[in-house]
């Protein structure tokens, strides 16, 4: 960033709009179209106005400092980039008001930021203390989240926002280089989306570290998930507009020590996820899990289940609850299952095996080799078929799962307009 006088920066940071000496205003750095600073009583209005007035293709930049917001920020213009110019740019939403009936006063208790414009990028800043989601991007295409930290000062508590980074119904998602701490549902959540890259992130202290839900064509790699309730979740859920989630590749991640007590709000889906899960594949199809290090997760390293095994009747006639074409291979498992945090699983003894399967099979595809669960080439992996479905007895026999599926392709680029 171009250098400028520190005393002038301080004065302008307090009230940039009131700096009358035009020459003293910090120059706009290269690559930025708009430059904003913290401070002043009209901060909320000033920043929101800048986001509204920015033209398509603009980069709105923020100088280091803490920006105390009282309401949600929104972006609807396409191809906007929100960027911190240096370390120490903090968007703090602790003063955002909660709605009537939610223990607070009037006003929006929604998210820190809500985005509907296509081609959105946010990078190099911290988002803190949102009563709703940290940042939500919805119903659009091409969203990039880069070098963000999203957290809550209260730690891992139920009152935190549900999701930290939350793209939903987005075609083309890139989430990279982010750290997320304290989400009461999922730290990094991608829902009902297509063509997804989640890489080089660190997630800890959340209920779910990374969750890919009802989405297609995801590549989740080189992440570290630790000290969550569950490390990486790949779900299909019923009664959603997009049901047919498939082709999620989970590779080369470190998934360890995800034993945090579940602090999700009662009644939510993830509130029923037991602590101690490295990975959970539920009802999703064509999931490939390879090259990961999965260790020290007290319930299990990886669990593959039918929706009905946890939640009963999905009450959705079009929903396929069976996880089909799952391939878990060439991972390293160690010291998982030492202390299962789920009463049903305790019946199978302790320690439990690293890889657990509920044993349920779609009777219409029972003889179809393309639908099988394959578990091959893993180091240190113990296996158990829990036989909660149609197979008559629990077994640790791995031979029926000595099979392979077609490898999923890696994803290197997002769709272009």
Image: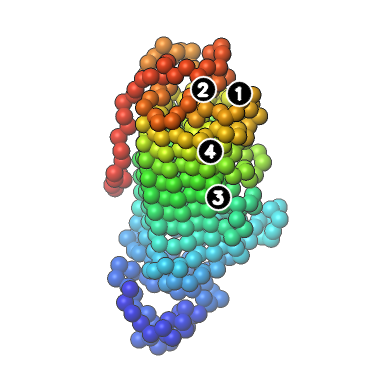
| CA distance for labels 4 and 2 | 16 Å
Viewer-side label of 4, 3: 4
Q: Quadrant location of residue 400?
A: top left
Q: In this rendering, would 271 be left or right of 49? A: right
Density class for disc 4 (Cα within 10 Å; few <14, some 14-19, many ≥20) is many
Q: Quadrant of the N terminus?
A: bottom left
Query: In the drawing, what numbered circle is on residue 348?
Result: 1
Viewer-side label of 3, 2: 2
Residue linked to disc 4: 297
- Say whether disc 4 or disc 1 marks the residue closer to the N-terminus: 4
In this view, the residue in front, 158 or 375, is: 375
Cβ–Cβ below 8 Å for labels 4 and 1? no
Residue linked to disc 3: 205
Residue linked to disc 2: 384
- Say whether disc 3 or disc 2 marks the residue closer to the N-terminus: 3
Q: Quadrant location of residue 92?
A: bottom right
């Amino acid at each position: 960033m171009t250098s400028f006088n520190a005393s002038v920066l301080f004065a302008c940071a307090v009230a940039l709009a009131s700096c009358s000496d035009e020459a003293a205003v910090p120059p706009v750095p290269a690559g930025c179209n708009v430059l904003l600073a913290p401070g002043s009583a009209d901060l909320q209005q000033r920043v929101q106005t800048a986001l509204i007035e920015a033209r398509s293709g603009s980069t709105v930049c923020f100088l280091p400092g803490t920006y105390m917001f009282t309401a949600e920020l929104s972006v609807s213009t396409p191809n906007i980039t929100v960027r911190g110019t240096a370390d120490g740019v903090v968007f703090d939403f602790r003063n955002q008001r909660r709605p009537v009936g939610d223990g607070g006063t009037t006003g929006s208790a929604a998210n820190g930021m809500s985005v509907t414009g296509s081609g959105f990028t946010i990078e190099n800043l911290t988002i803190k203390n949102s009563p709703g989601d940290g940042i939500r991007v919805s119903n659009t295409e091409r969203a990039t989240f880069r070098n963000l930290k999203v957290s809550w000062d209260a730690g891992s508590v139920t009152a935190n926002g549900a999701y930290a980074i939350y793209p939903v119904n987005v075609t083309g998602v890139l989430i990279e280089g982010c750290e997320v701490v304290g989400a009461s549902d999922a730290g990094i959540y991608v829902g009902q989306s297509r063509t997804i890259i989640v890489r080089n992130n660190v997630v800890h202290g959340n209920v779910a570290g990374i969750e890919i839900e009802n989405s297609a064509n995801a590549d989740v790699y080189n992440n570290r998930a630790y000290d969550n309730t569950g490390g990486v979740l790949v779900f299909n859920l019923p009664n959603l507009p997009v049901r047919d989630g498939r082709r999620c590749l989970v590779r080369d991640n470190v998934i360890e020590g995800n034993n945090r007590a579940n602090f999700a709000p009662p009644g939510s889906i993830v509130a029923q996820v037991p602590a101690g899960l490295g990975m959970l594949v539920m009802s999703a199809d064509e999931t490939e899990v390879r090259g990961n290090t999965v260790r020290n997760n007290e319930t299990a390293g990886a669990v593959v289940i039918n929706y009905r095994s946890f939640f009963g009747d999905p009450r959705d006639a079009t929903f396929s609850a069976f996880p089909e074409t799952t391939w878990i291979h060439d991972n390293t498992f160690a010291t998982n299952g030492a202390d299962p945090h789920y009463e049903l699983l305790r019946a199978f003894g302790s320690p439990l095996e690293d890889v657990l399967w509920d044993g349920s099979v779609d009777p219409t595809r029972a003889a179809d080799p393309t639908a099988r669960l394959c578990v091959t080439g893993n180091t240190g992996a113990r296996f158990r078929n829990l036989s909660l479905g149609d197979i008559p007895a629990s077994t640790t026999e791995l031979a029926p799962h000595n099979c392979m599926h077609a490898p999923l392709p890696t994803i290197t680029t997002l769709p272009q307009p």
